[in-house]
Structures are given as C-alpha cells and as structure tokens.
Image (tube, rainbow, N blue to C red):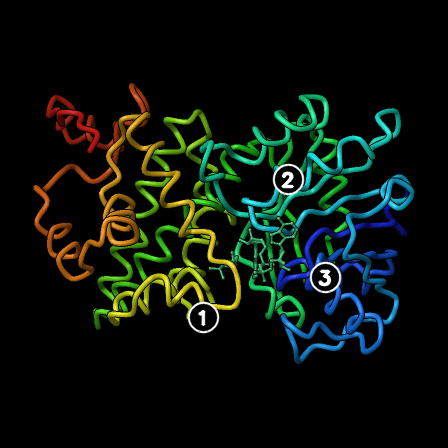
Amino acid sequence: MDYDRSKVLVFGAGNFGSCLADHLADSFHTVYLWSRDEKIVRHFNQYHRNPEFLQDHVFPESITAVGPEFPSESIIRHVDVLLFAIPTEGVRETLTALKPRLDEKNLPLLIFVNKGIEISTHALTLEIIVDTCGPDIAKVAAFISGPSFAKEIVERQPTSVSVASLSKKHAERASQLFHQPWFRCYTGDDPIGVELAGALKNVYAIAAGMSDGLGFENNTRAMLITRGLAEMSRIGTAYGASPLTFLSLAGVGDLFLTCSSSTSRNYTVGYRLGKGEKLDYIIETLGSVAEGVTTAKALRTIISKLDVAAPIATAVYEVLYEGGDVAEKAKLLMNLPPIREIDLPDGAGKPAQQLLKKLELDSVEYETTSS
Ligand SMILES: NC(=O)C1=CN([C@@H]2O[C@H](COP(=O)(O)OP(=O)(O)OC[C@H]3O[C@@H](n4cnc5c(N)ncnc54)[C@H](O)[C@@H]3O)[C@@H](O)[C@H]2O)C=CC1
Ligand SMILES: O=C(CO)COP(=O)(O)O
C-alpha cells in the first residue's frame, strides 16, 4: 500500500466525513465520498460544496461523491482505505452491507472516527466489527479520536488526535495517512480506551452544557470536567482499558474541548436543556448528530453492570430519559457526601511515599474508597 497516494472511500458525508475527505484530498490522496443522500451527491459533484454540512466550505474538485446506493464491490475493492464517519448507530448496518463486498485476501485498512456506544447492545465499535466482519478485521482496524471539530480542521487550524489499533502497523499506517503539519497524530495500542474516551466525553459535554445553560460559570464547568474525567477513567478501568488513555488527546483533550465550546453539538444539547427546552425539539432542530444522547442510555446499563459510581453520567441519563429536572439534578450532585478525591488501582501509587517517609508521615493510612 502506497501511503504517499492512497485511494480512500469515506462512508458518511456529514460534517466529519466531508471534513476528512477534504483533508485527505488536500494531501493528494484519491478520495471517494459516499452519501446515501442523492441531493448531496449531485450537489457535491456539481458545485464542490456540501449543501447540508460545512456549507461555507469549497471542497477540492478531486473528491468524487458516490451514492446514494451502497458502494459497489468494484469501488470497495479498488480502494486501499475505508474510512467510516457515520454515527455509531449506523455502523452495524454499514459493516453488514460491506462484508460480502470485501476481498478477504487483500483487505483495505479500516478506520473508524465515530464516538459512541450502540444503544441496543451496549457494544463498542470494536465489538460491532467482530460481530459483523470477524476478529481478523477487528485486529487491524484503527480508531481515530481526539479534540477535532470538523469546522476547525477545514480551516487548517492546528489539531492533534489519538490513533489506536491492536495492530501497531495499522495504527502507524492510519497515522501516516492523516499526519500533516496542521494535523498531528499520536499512535497507541488501547483502542478500547480510545473508543470509550471518545464516546463518554459526549455525555459529560451534555452535563457541562446543562451547567452553563443553568447560568453557572467557570468554577462549575471546571468541576464537571475534572469529576467527569474521574468517572470516565473509573468506567474505562473497570472495562479493562488503560487509565492513562484518559489523559490522552482522546481523553482529557476531547473532554476539555467539547465541555467548553458551543461548537459541540453535545454541549449544545445540554445547554438548551439547561435553558428549559425539550429534548425531542432539540434533537429535531439540531441538524446533526449528538452521539452523547444515545451513549448516555447505553452507558446507564454499563455503569450498573460494572457496578461503578458515575453520578454525573447517571444524572445526565435521568434528565434525558426519565424527565429529571436539570436544576434539581445539579443540586443533588452537589449534596452527595464528601469522598476521597483520587481512586487508585489496588496497590498502585500511594502518593509521594518517599516524601511521606522522610517526613515520618508514612504510617498515616487513608482508607481506600471507590465512589
Ligand atoms: N463533527 C465533528 O467535528 C466530529 C464528529 N465525530 C464523530 O463522527 C461521527 C459522524 O459525525 P458527523 O459527521 O459530525 O455527523 P453529522 O450528523 O454531521 O453527519 C452524519 C452523516 O452520517 C449519515 N448517516 C447517518 N446514519 C447513517 C447510516 N446508517 N448509514 C449511512 N450514513 C448514515 C448522515 O446521513 C450524515 O450524512 C459521529 O460519531 C461523531 O461523534 C468525531 C470527531 C469530530
Ligand atoms: O467530537 C467532537 C470534536 O472532537 C465533536 O463534538 P460534538 O459531537 O459534540 O459536536
């Protein structure tokens, strides 16, 4: 596979699929952009603009929009890379249609950029890939996540992301494909952690938006980001992901971005809920996907199964799905009993042991709690 000039088929011509198609075409790759919307395909090929998303942007003429029919076997076998930029709820259906069209002896690189958990199965994308395409394909899939608003990438604002795969070689290939002076990629081997971080931060972005919508300011948002990160790491660690992944671009980087900007759809959903709007109306008028809404539901079940404390995610779920009042939930969160701040995995990192020893304070023991 020649990564100087690859042939890439992007699934999904929404904000992020269009943005990444633009980025890759600008790096001289041959790009096909699939949309199931005939109007987008026609308009894109004629005017090099997307009539629904990133409307102000003119795309390179070299991008070919394809659709609305599912891409044919001939185009799928013609490309080196398949890039999936569709919401998580559409991934199973897309991979099921894709599988019989793949050349098993000459697999392309599969890259996923969605940030969510499937609502009916509580599955991560890695699990959906195993279910639909088998473990051999899941082993070489790469996941890209991190603080990366589509609108800012098309403006070539300096951006960095995490790229994870169980296969080092494939993480490096995906990184090499996207890496540019305006777009840095950092590779890693914890796709589950990267996926969870990307999905969970959306739920906490809804919480941060709610807080701003209620009229709270910087202290409250900083508290939600920090305690949200603690919840994310706790859930991720219970899942078997590395706690350090939550300190990456995919973790704290994206959490910070989406909790602090009205460019985020998830933040916007929370903000409008905080202002008293109804969820159904917000979703109907948002014009784009906010994955945190479905992820909050899947996460509620995961939290109970793993038996981990996640009071912020639980409060978001209760507002979204049980008619909970935003201000009431905020009050309840603030009235939880005081707890120890940092949860440490068993036996790990007692704080500053050497200094405590020197000060003869090492016999003082904290009780370990995990709430
Ligand atoms: N917009 C952004 O800045 C970023 C988005 N993402 C993630 O990328 C994914 C896609 O997001 P956006 O492009 O922003 O959403 P979007 O709402 O702008 O566009 C989604 C696109 O996917 C299509 N789609 C939906 N369901 C589909 C299905 N079942 N089969 C085929 N196509 C389907 C829609 O028609 C639409 O064109 C989400 O998981 C999002 O969290 C990740 C990083 C940044
Ligand atoms: O994930 C994103 C940027 O990294 C986009 O966030 P929203 O989906 O909340 O807009």
Q: Is mark 2 within 8 Å of ligand 1?
A: yes
How far is mark 3 from mark 1, CA to CA?
A: 36 Å
For residue 362, above or below residue 252: above
- Dot 2: element: helix
- Dot 1: element: helix
Q: Residues within 10 Å of mark 2 (few under 14, many from 20)?
A: few
Q: Is 338 in front, or is 96?
A: 96
Q: Quadrant of residue 157?
A: bottom right
How far is mark 1 from mark 2, CA to CA?
A: 25 Å
Q: Quadrant of residue 295?
A: top left
How far is mark 2 from mark 3, CA to CA?
A: 35 Å
Answer with left or right where residue 301 lies relative to residue 64.
Answer: left
Q: Which x, y percent locates residue 37?
A: 70, 62
Q: Is mark 3 within 8 Å of ligand 2?
A: no
Judged from this view, the residue extending furthest toward the top is 347
Which numbered disc, 1 or 2, marks the residue that appears first in the sequence?
A: 2
Q: Which residue is mark 1?
A: 285
Identify the disc placed on residue 301: none
* Quadrant of the drawing holding the N terminus: top right
* Quadrant of the drawing holding the C terminus: top left
Mark nearest the camera among 2 and 3 is: 2
Answer with left or right where residue 121 lies relative to residue 107.
Answer: left
